[in-house]
Amino acid sequence: MAPKQYRIVGGPSKFDLMIAFFARELDGGRRSVTFSLSFPRVIDDLRWLEDVEVILNDLQWEDGSGESWNWKGYTLGAKQRGWGPDVEGHFSTHTRLGWLRVREIAAV
């Protein structure tokens, strides 16, 4: 299936991105970051927001500003959303806005 893209309307600080990418939990596990996504569905005049946990595998400066990032990783709990685990996106730690692209799981 074609990838879908969602708006990020909130997310981690630059420090939280760094910790998630470089540090491990005490048990050796990977740390996640949380992005808040806005979905194009309106319920009672409010946009539907959902937090998504992501484990980062790749993190790059987008423009050298130190505030704009391209990243790749995988989601925790992706199957419950009908998504494949792989995600990528762009995020600004200055504005806390960006986008997240996912690949949906093909119907069997």
Image (cartoon, rainbow, N blue to C red):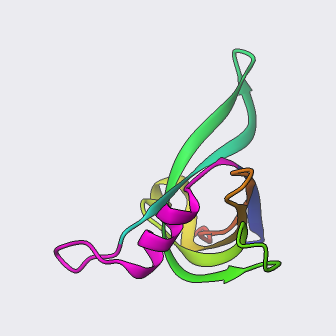
User: Whole-percent x and y of residue 56?
Assistant: 51, 76
Does 41 appear in magenta? no
Looking at the rendering, in which quadrant would you find the N terminus? bottom right
The segment highlighted magenta reads: 9-30
Camera-side residue: 51 or 22? Answer: 22
- Quadrant of the rendered image containing residue 106: bottom right
Left of 90 or right of it: where is 81? left
Q: From the viewer's perspective, is residue 87 above or below residue 61? A: above
Residue at image position (56%, 59%) is 82
Residue 73 image position (x, y, % from top left): 55, 77
Say which of 69 and 2 sits in front. 69
The quarter of the picture where the C terminus appears is bottom right
In this rendering, would 53 be left or right of 64? left
Q: Nearer the viewer, residue 70 or 82?
A: 70
- Residue 51 placed where, x, y %? 53, 46
Check the image and report above or below for 14 versus 95. Answer: below
Question: Residue 11 in magenta?
Answer: yes
| In the image: residue 41, left or right of residue 29 | right
Quadrant of res 41:
top right
Q: Position of residue 7 (x, y in %)?
A: 75, 51
